[in-house]
Image: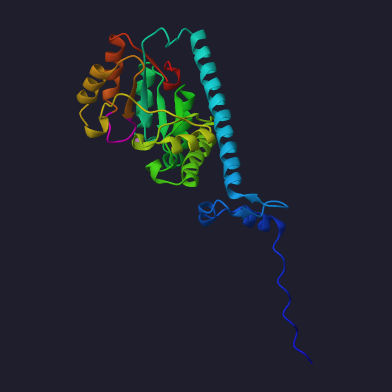
């Protein structure tokens, strides 16, 4: 009897075939005359790329408008309670890299001084201390995104950047039930591409304009001196929420800034 003939290969499921058709290789991109199999007559790669870029730009514009609107609403709410950084001298105390072992103590210090601050959180730390993050939000501080594991974002491709941001958003949402709208890129390492990916992830980039260099010293006096000398209206005064940084410096910094007439606010309330 004849051996069973090998069955013909089964066709790929439709979704997989679509995926293969949509996938544009670098070689194809380098040859603008290549035609993509994306319809009865196909579409030239250049046209497809232009269409993709137009969609990305539109998405970015939508997010940019949405975030600007949210910020404006936050400032309106603050104005209703008597805080207006367009007319007052405001500075923002910000804490990066937490939550850490000292965060609860920091929250106590801030509560004693009646200060609302901004916490740029590292997602992998949020996962380790979700309770602390919940307490931070409950105390009225602003939670913001500082990536999942603190990489230099400009060295990562778009997908990896998106992943850094999205995982952190998810961790903060699950710990505290709030969705951050601000991102501080580690080391201030940012370019237009990263800004664009961030916007499309619902995050606006915030840097800083005064460094207390608190992570360089365990001496509480030095960051205090730098904050007092360097502050000007609209400053975001960064500190690190990590064991290397003295929580003990914070009360002195708060007192000095207030003595100079500054109002301490969360970073989203600083005048744009
Ligand atoms: Ni950092």
In the rendered image, is residue 36 in sight?
A: yes
- Position of 84 with respect to 170 (left or right) is left
Q: Residue at x 45, y 21 (%)?
A: 268
Q: Is residue 163 above or below residue 243?
A: below
Q: Is residue 185 above or below residue 44?
A: above
By secondary structure, the bulk of the magenta-drawn segment is best described as loop
Q: Residue at x 51, y 35 (%)?
A: 175
Q: Is residue 40 above or below residue 247?
A: below
Q: Is residue 34 above or below residue 4?
A: above
Question: In the image as oriented, which residue stretches furthest toward the front?
Answer: 33
User: In which quarter of the view is residue 25 placed?
Assistant: bottom right
List x then y, in percent, for residue 204: 47, 29
Depth check: 195 or 174 in front? 195
List x then y, in percent, for residue 9: 70, 71
Please give the range of residues in magenta.
240-246
In the rendered image, is residue 101 in sight?
A: no
List x then y, in percent, for residue 176: 51, 31
């Amino acid at each position: 009897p004849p051996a069973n003939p090998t069955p013909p290969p089964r066709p790929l499921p439709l979704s997989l075939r679509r995926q293969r058709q949509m996938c544009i290789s670098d070689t194809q991109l380098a040859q603008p005359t290549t035609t993509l199999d994306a319809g009865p007559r196909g579409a030239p790669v250049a046209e497809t790329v232009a269409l993709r870029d137009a969609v990305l730009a539109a998405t970015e514009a939508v997010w940019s408008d949405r975030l600007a609107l949210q910020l404006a609403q936050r400032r309106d709410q603050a104005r209703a309670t008597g805080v207006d950084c367009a007319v007052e001298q405001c500075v923002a105390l910000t804490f990066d890299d937490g939550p850490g072992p000292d965060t609860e103590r920091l929250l106590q210090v801030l509560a004693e001084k009646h200060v609302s601050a901004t916490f740029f959180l590292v997602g992998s730390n949020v996962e380790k201390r979700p309770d602390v993050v919940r307490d931070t939000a409950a105390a009225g501080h602003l939670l913001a995104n500082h990536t999942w594991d603190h990489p230099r974002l400009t060295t990562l491709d778009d997908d990896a950047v998106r992943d850094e941001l999205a995982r952190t958003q998810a961790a903060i949402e699950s710990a505290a039930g709030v969705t951050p709208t601000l991102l501080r890129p580690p080391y201030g390492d940012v370019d237009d591409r990263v800004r664009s990916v961030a916007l499309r992830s619902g995050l606006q980039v915030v840097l800083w304009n005064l460094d207390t260099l608190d992570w360089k010293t365990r001496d509480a006096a030095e960051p205090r001196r730098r904050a007092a000398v360097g502050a000007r209206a609209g400053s975001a005064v960064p500190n690190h929420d990590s064991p290397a940084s003295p929580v003990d410096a914070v009360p002195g910094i708060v007192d000095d800034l207030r003595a100079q007439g500054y109002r301490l606010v969360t970073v989203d309330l600083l005048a744009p």
